[in-house]
Image (cartoon, rainbow, N blue to C red):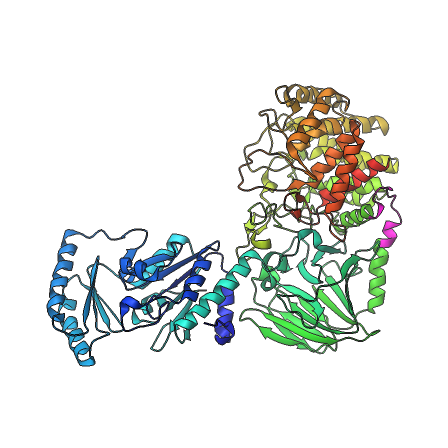
Amino acid sequence: MALTAEALPAELRREIVQLARTPRLLVACDYDGTLAPIVADPTQAKPLPESVHALRSLAALPATTTAVISGRALRDLATLSRLPAEVYLVGSHGSEFDVGFVHELQPEATQLRTELQIGLQDIVRGKDGVTLEAKPASVAVHVRRAEPDVAGEVLETVRTGPAQWEGVQVTEGKEVIELAVVQTDKGNALDTLRHQVGATAAVFLGDDVTDEKAFARLHGPDLGIKVGDGDTLARYRIGDAADVATVLAFLMEERRTWLYGEQAPPIERLTMLSNERTVALLTPDARLTWMCHPGPDSAAVFADLLGGPGAGHFSIRPHGGNGTQRSPLPLGQRYVPNTMTVETRWSRLLVTDYLAHGTDSHRTDLIRVISGSTTADVEFAPRPEFGQVPVRLTAEAGGLRVQGTSEPMVLYSPGVQWEITSDGMHESAHAVLELTDGDPVVLELRCGTDDLSPARPEPERRDEADRYWSDWMKTLSLPEVERDLVARSALTLRGLCNTDTGGIMAAATTSLPEEIGGVRNWDYRYCWLRDGAMTAQALVTLGSTEEAEAFLDWLHRVLETLPGPERLHPLYTLQGTGLGPEAVIDSLPGYAGSRPVRVGNLADQQVQLDVFGPVVELIAHLAQATGRIRDVDWELVTAMATAVSQRWFEPDHGIWEERDVPRHHVYSKVMCWVTLDRAVKLAAAYDREADPSWAPLRDQIAQDVVKNGWHPDVQAFTTAYEGSDLDAASLHVGLSGLIDPADERFQATVTAIEAELRSGSTVYRYRRDDGLPGDEGGFHLCAAWLIEAYLLIGRRTEAEELFQQIVDTAGPTGLLSEEYDPIAERSLGNHPQAYSHLGLIRCAQLLSA
């Protein structure tokens, strides 16, 4: 049997597409006349194999439940259907569940059922073609095979006789009447299943009048489909059991695509655009897959990366491809050297993308230049608020207006003829462009304005954007080792900075998984004190100080809102405000099916006592680079030292933000020591007054770390005072200078971490149970720390080899994500990640020295 979804009504297909995207789906249907065609002999009613396959495949999907709710006795239903165990079976119009008979009959009900059996036997005796079906709590009278006059006589006798008895529940269907001694209702059965599995939406398919009780219970996003003729409460109607198979197969494909992602591009092959106000990500075939507005930590306008095409995308490709195949593949993608402008090239098509500079702070202008000598397809599908707001598009002379959003948005595209289509909730626009050499088409997505008037000539805007980056690059001093990759890392770090506030993002994305299909999916679009300070420090070491000064000014403004520096949170928004509660976007399936998709970060409420050290370390590097220390920066030094003095002895959640009980982390104690050590040295070097308590407390903390952090049985500095587990962050005992790298205990720690945490080309943070399910990849930053440790103890060959392995994991445009899976040989985690790029810069500098 050929299954073609195109044979279904267009409106029904759109409803199925929407239903497939519900977080927890219940798929339920009748048996006779729905899964199985009606036949003269009910004992020969076999389900269509295509329907069985679709139900089995749906049942195998995550967050998806399938069920058959039939008037047949459960025993007969199971024997006849031979459906797999994954499919729930409900018999006797809802009075029998395959997880156990839900009604334990009372003695009076048992007696009544016996009397029904006897009474109905008397009525049907001698009536050809009439049969009785005995069930645990009911008796059904079938007249399908009887002559019409005989059938009518029997049914009327039953209706006026036993059906009137007290305590009898009557259900009539096509050529059947069933008398039960308990409440039987397919609607009740559907509600029971919905409650049991926590379904957020349900679909029910049925052909019989008894199915109307189930249709009556559908509401909200639910979908009811009537099979065949007859009055119905269902919104949609299809012809027969073959159409049921088509519906189930189509739903299964849509559900699977939504859950697992549609050809999710490898994370390392995603390329970032930036204008130092916001960021956007492109796939290798020029598909805008991620962009938020008005800021990079706002709700997404295009979330294809986490939800597939239905979550919003902006695609350009040679004519002939489509949203699924995306063919032919491009020849390559690259950054224009020393800029954040990206070129994607096919044999006769070039797409050039950049985020414009020189706009107002509330605006985001993405410019896409399409040139070549071919025909190109463009699809524009914005989905503001993570696709949760219905979108309407209006074509005007200057381009397209996006309506229904809180933020104004237009696509400036004069002369382009758009075809607008709808999937029932959102509208999309499609255009076919005939390109000729020397006559590019320019598309300008303008967020934050409804202005469709002409802008400055595109070449001027391109030159402005490119010069912004290239002029900055000329100020840097790059190491000789991997010079080009370091340059790209510097641009990436600069691109994660916010020019308006001074805040620095930890990464450009949220919820890219640390394990494909896993739950370790976090939102990194915020400014961590630690990450921001380390990013700014990396740029200072390359010769750029403005990012550090802006970040420290940002931090100073944050401190002005607090009762004391010891109350600093680990992270803030780019605006310097506290985060809202961590939330889950249930409507998005996640990258390659990795759920949940999170917005916000619960680490905001943690205690992380290491954050003070990187701030003072940054100030020390900035002072060394500029030859002075600003008064406002010395105030920060004093504030950080004060915070350490008040809290260093407490347990905390540590650098890795474990969602477990606080511990006395070695790394956190080391960073408290760094805070005071650098403060004392800064005071001496720049004629500032140090608190007399700083130096003694620094020495006390060092003694505490050496005494309690070293584990003689493990022969290493461990994660925390309370255990014997290892953590790559403990390498900072030597990297920071708290103990001499020549100390045998540091060398032993390097060896222990190498043995337990290094796996080929990567280094894991730790191997302990952190209270979360699943695994994760190795961290590029941890590998960078081990490289630095190798160099400190004279193991240069190992350092060079590991560094080359990090370099080899970078994507084709030079970007690094947070983690790497050495088994699957793929990148993991949010992308691009500041930690990874600042680690690469540090290693290249050390290897060039």
Q: Judge left or right: residue 515 versus residue 183.
A: right
Q: Residue at x 49, y 67 (%)?
A: 250
Q: Residue at x 44, y 57 (%)?
A: 59
Residue furthest to the bottom in view is 149
Q: Position of residue 717 (x, y in %)?
A: 66, 25
Q: Residue at x 66, y 30 (%)?
A: 755
Q: Does 609 appear above or below 221?
A: above
Please indicate, yes or no, whether residue 689 appears anywhere in the rendered image.
no
The quadrant in which residue 78 appears is bottom left
Q: Judge left or right: residue 113 versus residue 327.
A: left
Q: Nearer the viewer, residue 198 or 515?
A: 515
Q: Nearer the viewer, residue 755 or 783?
A: 755
Q: Judge left or right: residue 374 versus residue 245.
A: right
Q: Position of residue 148 (x, y in %)?
A: 20, 80
Q: Nearer the viewer, residue 808 or 843?
A: 808
Q: Does 527 appear above or below 672?
A: below
Figure quadrant of the N terminus: bottom left
Please indicate, yes or no, whether residue 523 appears anywhere in the rendered image.
yes
Q: Is residue 474 magenta?
A: yes
Q: Does 13 appear above or below 711?
A: below
The quadrant in which residue 563 appears is top right
Q: Position of residue 757 (x, y in %)?
A: 65, 33
User: Magenta region: which residues?
Assistant: 470-484
Q: Is residue 546 magenta?
A: no
Is the magenta region chiefly helix, strand or loop?
Answer: loop
Q: Position of residue 508 (x, y in %)?
A: 69, 51
